[in-house]
Amino acid sequence: MLKTPSFAEERDLQERGYRFVAGIDEAGRGPLAGPVVAAAVILPCPLAAPWLSQVRDSKQLLPARRESLFQYIQETAIAIGVGTVPHDVIDHRGIVHATRLAMQQAIERLSPPADYLLIDYLRLPGVPIPQKAITNGDTLCFSIACASIVAKVTRDRLMRETDSIYPGYGFAQHKGYGTRKHLACLRRLGPSPVHRRSFRPVKELSYRQYRRTPSAEATV
């Protein structure tokens, strides 16, 4: 049985005097292409809205449901911040650093600012705001679940735009994840400018292509 989120964490913090509790989550750590996107969401608490019963971790929701919930969250939230870190930073600094950077950007874009952070899995050592990392937070905590929806919808929209710039890879369908179709397109077309060269399937393909070039063969 799927777990459903609650306001237990937010209510506890509110009773301790925190007014603006932000849930933080990301989308796009695993794909082979495109950015990692993070969102920070501050919800009213308590909140009695009919749509709240539909909120889950974004991975458990169909795209149409995510889009409709995204609109409700935008209309209801006290504040929303979004951070986006591109593929080249992921390649140079690593996905964990890039994810933390996207989360920091999202937090900085909250208005009013958060006075406590509930984060899915990660802690943010460089952020001087009280915080708690919650394992599976997107399935347990409403604020984090809503942040996961905002991050996922935002990133999916970016990948649909990317598909129009780099057609042929199917970014609008798989959003950069390593599906069988995506890997077949990679082998046929080679990496696009937005592919993550540090991720193994792309890295291995790039190396094989390099080995086949005349200049590379001349130096072997």
Image (cartoon, rainbow, N blue to C red):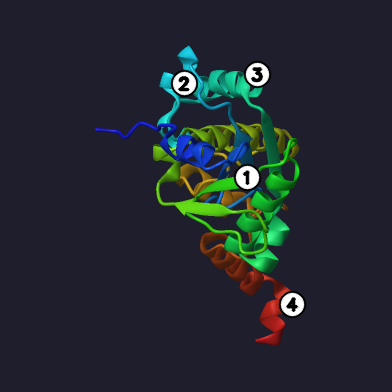
**Mark found first going from the N terminus, 3 or 2:** 2
**Alpha-carbon span between mark 3 and mark 1:** 19 Å
Q: Which residue corresponds to mark 1?
A: 38
**Alpha-carbon span between mark 3 and mark 4:** 57 Å
| Residue 152 found in image quarter | top right
Q: Is residue 7 left or right of residue 76?
A: left
**Alpha-carbon span between mark 4 and mark 1:** 41 Å
> Is 91 above or below relative to 160?
below
Q: Which residue corresponds to mark 3?
A: 75
| Residue 73 found in image quarter | top right
What is the secondary structure assignment of the residue under circle 3?
helix
Farthest top residue? 50
Farthest left residue? 1
**Alpha-carbon span between mark 2 and mark 1:** 21 Å
- Give yes or no for contact between labels 2 and 4 (Cβ–Cβ under 8 Å): no
**Mark found first going from the N terminus, 3 or 4:** 3
Residue lying at 74% horizontally and 77% vertically, measured from the top left: 215
Checking the image for residue 125, the label placed there is none
- Give yes or no for contact between labels 2 and 1 (Cβ–Cβ under 8 Å): no
Q: Which residue corresponds to mark 4?
A: 215
How dense is the environment of label 1, judged by Cα within 10 Å: few (below 14), some, or many (20 and up)? many
User: Amino acid under label 1?
Assistant: Ala
Q: Can you see residue 184? A: yes
What is the secondary structure assignment of the residue under circle 2?
helix
What is the secondary structure assignment of the residue under circle 1?
strand
**Mark found first going from the N terminus, 3 or 1:** 1
> Which of the two marks, 3 or 1, is nearer to us in this view?
3
Is the C terminus in the top left, top right, bottom left or bottom right quadrant?
A: bottom right
**Alpha-carbon span between mark 3 and mark 2:** 13 Å
How dense is the environment of label 4, judged by Cα within 10 Å: few (below 14), some, or many (20 and up)? few
